[in-house]
Image: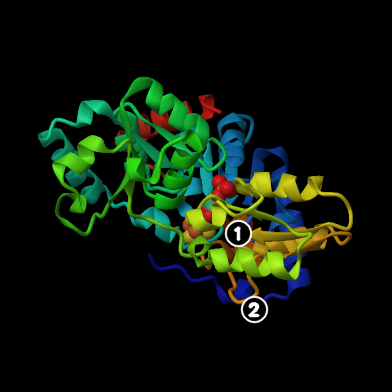
Amino acid sequence: MYYALPKEYREAETDELRERIRIAKEKLGNKAIILTHHYQRMEVVEFGDAVGDSYGLSKIAASSDHVEYIFFCGVHFMAESADILSSDNQLVFMPNPLAGCPMADMAEISDVLEAWEYLEKIGGDKKIMPVSYMNSAAELKAFTGEHGGLICTSSNADAAYKWGFARREKLFFFPDRHLGYNTGIKYGFKPADMVLWDFSRENGGLTVEQVEQAKVILWKGHCHVHTNFKAEHIKETREKYPEAKIVVHPECPAEVVENADATGSTSFIVKYVDQQPSGSTIAVGTEINLIHRLAHQYPDKKIFVLSGRICPVCANMYRTTLNDLAYCLENFKDIKPIRVDEDIKQNARLALERMLEVH
Ligand code: 13P
Ligand code: SF4
């Protein structure tokens, strides 16, 4: 996809952009809503009618029947989900349509179908419940819905596991191996109960016995932002700040999650930080924009990134700027909305609606 902002918007000063956004918002009144994910730039979040995690923002999108336009400042799978959950007469726009999620791209539908075909061949498909993380393309959501499964986010993954195991013997979890694994451990499984489906290898690199014995099959996807965090960062933080609380996102590897004080979605992290008493020291293992915003919002607490050696920025979340927002709000009538094909929408909605019911 080619996308370039007109010069007028690229070169506008921040104060001018703010004023133009304010006026455009005022003009749209209650016809529009701006949704911003927790990882968005602080100046973008300021203009959001809501800020939240992917679960929370989906809920808002699903229940905002009163608006005609949803402006989604986040990444592509979030805007797609908003389009699936909103009604047909509502339009969803992404101020920067190039913002994708590399983890979502790790589960291509052709690879998923190939894996499922193999499972059908060995007679396992009836026993297996597909559970897909919200960070996935609409096609994978539709596949999940069609095969009886549901979507989960990091805030309802535990409940999604319970839901899945109440109905089938095993889960096939797409595409984040870490969220899938961390949730499996919380559910009570041993590492040996979970196997990794390597989509670059024939039959996922697994034998029939391995598939049969597994309780959870994990797709080999990951978030390159959260996998930067390591157990040694926790050790160093504990040594340097013995009083610190450490809170991380469940997309981090198990070695990090197991040694942290708390783990949860971005909204969980926000709440956790809020609940720590004034004067607390809190190291956070997630995307840097959220950490900066928290540090700014709670000047009475010492809040910093879990490791000073890395900068966990999600370049895709960072793409959306005030320039994009101003352009999108002023010109949305000439911009292509985010639209999921009707044939995909129906099953994808089924899987997303199950997600909204399971919490
Ligand atoms: P949340 O659902 O916790 O907001 O996470 C979304 C995400 O992309 C984390 O990397
Ligand atoms: Fe995707 Fe990771 Fe960015 Fe979240 S932080 S949107 S999982 S790349």
Q: Secondary structure beneath disc 1? A: loop
Q: Is residue 248 visible?
A: yes
Residue linked to disc 1: 286
Picture residue at 35% right of the left edge, 21% below the top: 167
Label 1 sits on what residue type? Thr
Residue 11's disc number:
2
Q: Secondary structure beneath disc 2? A: loop
Report the front residue among 124 and 36. Answer: 124
Residue 102's disc number:
none
Q: Nearer the viewer, mark 1 or mark 2?
A: 1
Viewport quadrant of the C terminus: top right
Q: Which corner quadrant of the image does residue 308 belong to? A: bottom right
Label 2 sits on what residue type? Glu
Query: Counting residues from the N terminus, which is met first, the one under dot 1 or under dot 2?
Result: 2
Q: Does residue 106 appear left or right of residue 353 in this picture?
A: left
On whether ligand 1 comes within 8 Å of the CB at mark 1, the answer is: yes
